[in-house]
Structure formats: C-alpha cells, structure tokens
Amino acid sequence: MISPPDFLQGQLDLYGEQSGELGPWLAPHAEAVTCRALEQVIDFGLALLGRIEKENDRWAAEIEAGRVEFTWDASEAFAQRYRQWREMSDRLLRAIRKCEDSGCSAERAQELKDACRRVSLMALDTQRTRRSIESLEAGRGVPHAEAIDELRTRMG
C-alpha cells in the first residue's frame, strides 16, 4: 500500500506548531515583524500543501497505471493530511486577518486563502464517499450525471 510518506506527517506537525504559536505571538510584537513571520509560515504552508498534492498525484498515477491498487486506508491517510493542513491553515488565516486589520499585508496571503478554499471543497469524508460508491455499485442510488440532469430539469 502506498500512503503519504512519514516526512509529510513531520512537516504537518511542524506547520501545526508554527501556526499555533502565531496567535499569542502576534499581540506584543511590531506589526512589520509579525507580517514577516506570517509570510514565512504562509510560504511553508503553501509548500507543504504542494508536497501533499504531489504525493497524492503520484499515488493516483500509480493506481491509474495499475502498479498499485486503490485502498480506502491510503485514501483516508491522504484525506487526513489535507484535513490537518486545512485545520492549521485556518489558524493562520485568523493571524492574517489580525495582520490585515492592523493595516499590514502579508505576501501570498491571497494564495493561501485560495488554497484553503480549494481544500475545503474537496470530498475528504472518505467513509461517506465509500458508502456512496458501495451503494451505487449495489444498484442503490442514482449516478451523478443522472442526478445533475434531474436537477437541471427541475430548475427549468
């Protein structure tokens, strides 16, 4: 089974420490220094997301090529990494808002906001997805395309 490498978990842990420390650290320091610290954590967070995405894409390519089989455990491991990243990034977004409220701006803040929005739109509830797929395969439910067509018809 291919799952996210351990180094990603170590980086997620470090990102969590950095994003968690920003909250109390923001108040007593000069705004410029705070924004500089935010920029460094933003850069790290975006790089970490890129690594998670790269590993996820590699795993998907391995499945597509038939070199490994899909497993729900591996899928959940990746979903967990994305959820952890999003949770820590939410803390960072709060620090960015404080920085912006004080009149400063952090480079790449919008890029992080966009990345958070993108990750929040991912289907990361693997148990629910699994149940839906199994239900569809068992003949229960409606295929997505059919459901969308029905919605369009009803909406006129």
Image: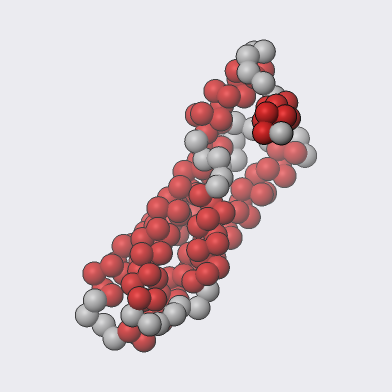
What residue is rendered at 39% in x and 76% in y? 100
Image quadrant in which you'd find residue 34: bottom left
Query: Disc count in the image?
Result: 0
Q: Quadrant of the C terminus?
A: top right
Q: Is residue 101 left or right of residue 148?
A: left
Q: Position of residue 25 (x, y in %)?
A: 26, 73
What residue is rendered at 33% in x and 84% in y? 31
User: Relative to residue 75, is residue 103 depicted above or below?
Assistant: below
Furthest residue in direction top, as rendered: 139
User: Relative to residue 5, is residue 124 depicted above or below?
Assistant: above
Visible residue check, residue 26: yes
Furthest residue in direction right, as rendered: 65
Please tell me which residue lies in front, 73 or 106: 106
Q: Quadrant of the N terminus?
A: top right
User: Relative to residue 73, is residue 27 depicted above or below?
Assistant: below
Q: Position of residue 104 (x, y in %)?
A: 40, 82
Please tell me which residue lies in front, 134 or 4: 134
User: Relative to residue 146, is residue 1 depicted above or below?
Assistant: below
Please tell me which residue lies in front, 25 or 48: 25
Q: Position of residue 27 (x, y in %)?
A: 24, 76
Q: Is residue 24 left or right of residue 61?
A: left
What residue is rendered at 71% in x and 42% in y? 62
Visible residue check, residue 67: no
What residue is rendered at 59% in x and 31% in y? 71
Q: Position of residue 23 (x, y in %)?
A: 28, 67
Please tell me which residue lies in front, 73 or 114: 114
